Amino acid sequence: MVAPLSAWPWENLGIFKYMLYGPLAAKFLYTWIYEDTLKDLWCLHILLVCALRGFVYQLWSSYNNMLFLTRNRRIKPQGVDFKQIDSEWDWDNFIILEALLASMACLMFPSLIALPVWNSKGFFTLLLLHVTVSEPLYYWAHRFFHGAYLFTHYHSLHHSSPVPHPFTAGHATPLEHLVLCAVIGIPMTGSILMGYGSISMVYSYVLAFDFLRCLGHSNAEVIPHEFFYKFPFLRYFLYTPTYHSLHHTDMETNFCLFMPLFDAIGNTLNINSWRLHEKITSDSEQRWRGPDFVFLAHVVDIMSAMHVPFVLRSFASTPFSTRFFLLPFWPLTFVIMLMMWAWSKTFLLSFYNLRGRLHQTWVIPRFGFQYFLPFATGGINKHIEDAILRADRMGVKVISLAALNKNEALNGGGTLFVNKHPELKVRVVHGNTLTAAVILNEFRKDVKEVFLTGATSKLGRATALYLCRRRVRVLMLTSSTERFQKIQKEAPADCQHYLVQVTKYQAAQNCKTWIVGKWITPWEQSWAPSGTHFHQFVVPPILAFRRDCTYGDLAAMRLPLDVQGLGSCEYTMERGVVHACHAGGVVHQLEGWTHHEVGAIDVDRIDLVWEAALKHGLRPVSSVNND
């Protein structure tokens, strides 16, 4: 049987739980529009406070996920995985609860509605009541929650998050938040009863309370140890993220709300608190471990730029799709794009661990369209080169180039950097060998003819040569007879006739297997017969225009089951799935191969790379039946 007040009454409502704010909005709008009065301004104040509280938590979440700023001051090195993100998905339930309680208080005590905007005396009484009542009340309540029954049925939920995060502060049961309501409500109620209450006092205290709660649950230390050297007494009046993280590690210590003074009085202060804090903030460079593998990505477009953990963690933990509620932020993102173009450097976006090895994703601060601007290519190559050299200095084993970063016209699929820096220890990999393997292993065994666009590209060439060796007829769409014949001559003499040059889409009107290596319009898709399946290796993916046809996903593989700390999706990929070029770099690193994989694809290695991927636990995610 579920313990009382251990589950939220609206936990099954999903996004519709926000309709609970509806009566407050409706009451305010009704009196404002139809009665032409602001007598229910208190409804607006409650809604504004709720919005600001959510904004405070979101800002702290964004800061924690800005790994390019916080990587050297992280307290726990592991990443927040999908399991924790899902567990903390409804972290903001407590804001709804406190909005309902505040509404009840305003309806029961009309005097609350008439509070002045400012009263300086209220801040003094508020601080006095907080220190003398709220702090000791929370300290002892928190200790009680660590008793066997209360911890098992109520407080264990809060401690179930392995990595502290600002949203962890709100991840608790209704009973715990009711206690917090009392803790936060007593100073405000006391000040109001004394006649010193004000609207500014309520706003300030509630937001400061949330700010400090987020501070304590941050996984990145923000307070330098020199601060406490200069003002040693303050270490007893303000806790730090390191201080509270020890409570989640050693649950018999550091119970305080915000002031370690009460842990010192109660003899529950962890003796390692100051030592760990100094270690985290003083030797951060020495503590930071360099990655073993780097996937060098880039931004696709304006909307996908918001699909990163430091914008919205929940959004980044699901496959990318256009969210209409983010459209108002498009102009701001556009301005940020221009700023990135002018000043930004390659930055760390995300990471995960695989079999004791640290894998990171770095991002070149360039958007997809910029790769097709002739005057921008030099700057892009400079960013890629700097990233490769930086990885080399850090001792990275393999760096894999994503999508446009390995464009043949841009840098010859990475050959530019390898030739320029022959002394590189880091292995530069384009990952296209595994990309080709993924596409080729999607085919049904009875396929005898395919239609290939982007036929003379790096992937198109390898795909055509591989298939013709297996006696599959390949209709290669290209207007360049010279490039077609060059590829045809690479095929074995007895297989060359399986490669056929075509110049129009009409040539494929009887072919039900299309490989799309160059973006095609709905009109061009219309030439495919009913029942066609579109395989593709083009970014962004083509529009699924034909309902009588099927569309494959971009070439990808699912990471091994023992991956740890993975909490964001790679573009449109499902959870745990990465682009094949990313997976190709992973395989290169796990295998310990010492060659660069740049330039043209070695067709003879396609099966070898595929078998190595399967050996290491990477799995295909194709929706096409291979039987």
Image: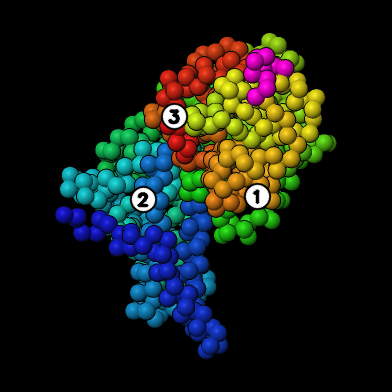
Given the image, on which type of amino acid does mark 1 rest? Ser
Residue 235 placement: quadrant: top left
**Left or right: residue 3 compared with residue 271:** left
Tell me if residue 19 is in the magenta stretch: no
Foreground tag (1 vs 3): 1
Along the line of sight, which residue is nearer the eye, 388 or 604? 604
Give the prevailing secondary structure in the magenta stretch: helix
On the rendered structure, is 403 left or right of 369?
Answer: left
Residues marked 2 and 3 touching at CB (< 8 Å): no
Nearest the eye: 587 or 246: 587
Picture quarter containing residue 599?
top right
| Residue at the disc numbered 3 | 619
Say which element carries label 1: loop
Q: Residue at x 43, y 43 (%)?
A: 165
**Would residue 65 be seen by someone viewing this image from the given angle?**
no
- Label 2 vs label 3: CA separation? 34 Å
Callout 3 amino acid: Arg
Residue 526 disc label = 1
Is 120 situated above or below 347? below
Q: Amino acid at mark 2?
A: His
Query: SS for tag 3?
Result: strand
Label 3 crowd bin: few (<14), some (14–19), many (20+), radius 10 Å:
some
Q: Which residue is mark 2?
A: 171
Who's the residue at 74% across and 40% down the image?
Answer: 504
Mark 1 vs 3, N-terminal side: 1
Q: Of discs 2 and 1, which sits in the foreground? A: 1
